[in-house]
Amino acid sequence: MQTQDEFLSNPGLVPQQHTVKRDCMICHEELIDPVSTSFCACRVLYCRECIMAWFKSSNKCATCQTRLYYLKPDYDGEEEYIYNEHEDENEGYRESYVFDVEAKFTCNALQVLILFSALLFLAIIS
């Protein structure tokens, strides 16, 4: 599977001619520079500008949710730390954990929550 940059350089859009007024599935306005996709079976029509904006913010098809590319780490070279303080209710003492996050990932809030939960769990069982 491609990275986002690879996919965006050649997203496989197919220009479409249409004689009947149709609406874009993203903006719900009349199609401007209509295109369809060549990578999934849904073959829905979109405005070229709308689908390209969609692809820049999502790695899935706007209609059928087929995954199109991998999200890559977005690392800016700076170290970040996540600080979490945990109090053990049974023991009555407080432990502090500092996680060194080497890369920031472009992902949705659920993925961030899952990643943070996994890091916290690993720190607690260590």
Image: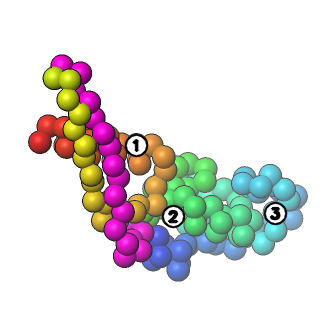
Q: Is residue 17 magenta?
A: no
Callout 1–callout 3 Cβ contact below 8 Å: no
Callout 3–callout 2 Cβ contact below 8 Å: no
Q: Residue 97 location, x and y as percent?
A: 25, 46
| Residue 110 seen in render | yes
Q: Identify the mark nearer the N-term, 1 or 2.
A: 2
Question: What is the magenta range?
Answer: 73-90
Is 73 situated left or right of 50 in this image?
left
Secondary element at image label 3: loop
Question: Residue at point 53% right, 78% down?
Answer: 10
Secondary element at image label 2: loop
Q: Residue 103 location, x and y as percent?
A: 34, 65
Quote the CA–CA distance across marks 1 and 2: 31 Å
Residue matched to label 3:
31
Q: Is residue 83 magenta?
A: yes
Residue 5 or residue 37, whichever sits in front: 5
Q: Identify the mark nearer the N-term, 3 or 2.
A: 3
Q: Mark 1 belongs to which amino acid?
A: Leu
Q: Nearer the viewer, mark 1 or mark 2?
A: 1
Q: What is the residue that sits farthest to the front in this orientation?
A: 93
Label 3 Cα neighbours within 10 Å, binned few <14 / some 14-19 / many ≥20: many
Residue matched to label 2:
39
Residue matched to label 1:
113
Q: Mark 3 belongs to which amino acid?
A: Leu
Q: Residue 19 location, x and y as percent?
A: 86, 65
Residue 51 or residue 20, whichever sits in front: 51
